[in-house]
Image: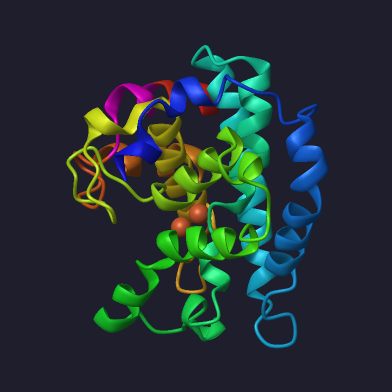
Amino acid sequence: MSALTSNIDTLIESYDVKCDVILTNHFTAIYDSLLADVKNYAADTNKYGDVLSQHLLRTSLMGSEFLKTLGFSDRAAENFKHANQLHDLGKIHECYDPNIWKTKHSPTPQEIAEKRKHPRLGVEILNRKLLESPAELQEHPHIRLIQSLQQFHHECVDASGYEGLNGDKMGNVIKTICIIDAYDGDMIHRPHQAAQRTPEEELNRLKNANKYRGKLDGDTLDRFTKFILG
Ligand SMILES: [Fe+2]
Ligand SMILES: [Fe+2]
């Protein structure tokens, strides 16, 4: 696990997804088919794939712009934008009934436990797709970035997240996706809410609500607040 998280901030600067020959030759078709699988997920039932695709796109665009404000290069920002669109791939794993992602009731403890498996299930789906691929793709830094974003986007600096990483092991890229994923998820309007939260309300909630107190990196959250509010 530590091998996936160590040096992600360095690794993301080490290649360029837009012109990397290994990725172009061996990964483009796999990536496109995975994005299509997400988009088409539960198309004939609850259409959760539509909701999920939009979340993946929004967090990717937001995260890519935000990372530049932290000093990451344009190239790293592009690498993030591409990789992050697979961070919730595990939600479409065949072990799930799609209705688990769109329940009208509050999730039961058993449903919560099942949902918490999606980070690792995302890595499983990706690795299965790569089984026949050359080693130079399987070991490519971009694949390691995708696997890290999949596995560690629900972490907390106090080590109470899904995989139990603490803040010292997270790095700026992982701290960023954990904040942006929470922000975007909370901004989606739910049927039981009278109105959608405003950005100010949600940022205040990330800073002060019991649910998030001590969980998100304070410095990154302050910078993100400035980024959103200007
Ligand atoms: Fe997730
Ligand atoms: Fe997410």
Please say whether residue 29 is one of the residues in the magenta stretch: no
Q: In the shown orientation, is residue 13 left or right of residue 150? A: right
The location of residue 227, given as percent across then percent down, is 52, 23
Q: In the shown orientation, is residue 111 left or right of residue 166? A: right
For the point 63% across and 25% down, the residue is: 77
Looking at the rendering, which quadrant does residue 202 occupy? top left
The location of residue 212, given as percent across then percent down, is 26, 46
Q: In the shown orientation, is residue 161 left or right of residue 183? A: left
Q: Nearer the viewer, residue 166 or 66?
A: 166
Quarter of the image with the C terminus in it: top right
Looking at the rendering, the stretch of residues picked out in magenta corresponds to: 216-222
For the point 68% across and 28% down, the residue is: 78
Name above or below for residue 95 compared with residue 171: below
The location of residue 214, given as percent across then percent down, is 19, 38
The location of residue 194, given as percent across then percent down, is 48, 66
Name above or below for residue 150 compared with residue 33: above
Q: Main secondary structure of the magenta part?
A: helix
For the point 58% across and 72% down, the residue is: 92
Please indicate, yes or no, whether residue 50 appears anywhere in the rendered image. Answer: yes
Q: Nearer the viewer, residue 18 or 202?
A: 18
Q: Nearer the viewer, residue 179 or 194?
A: 179
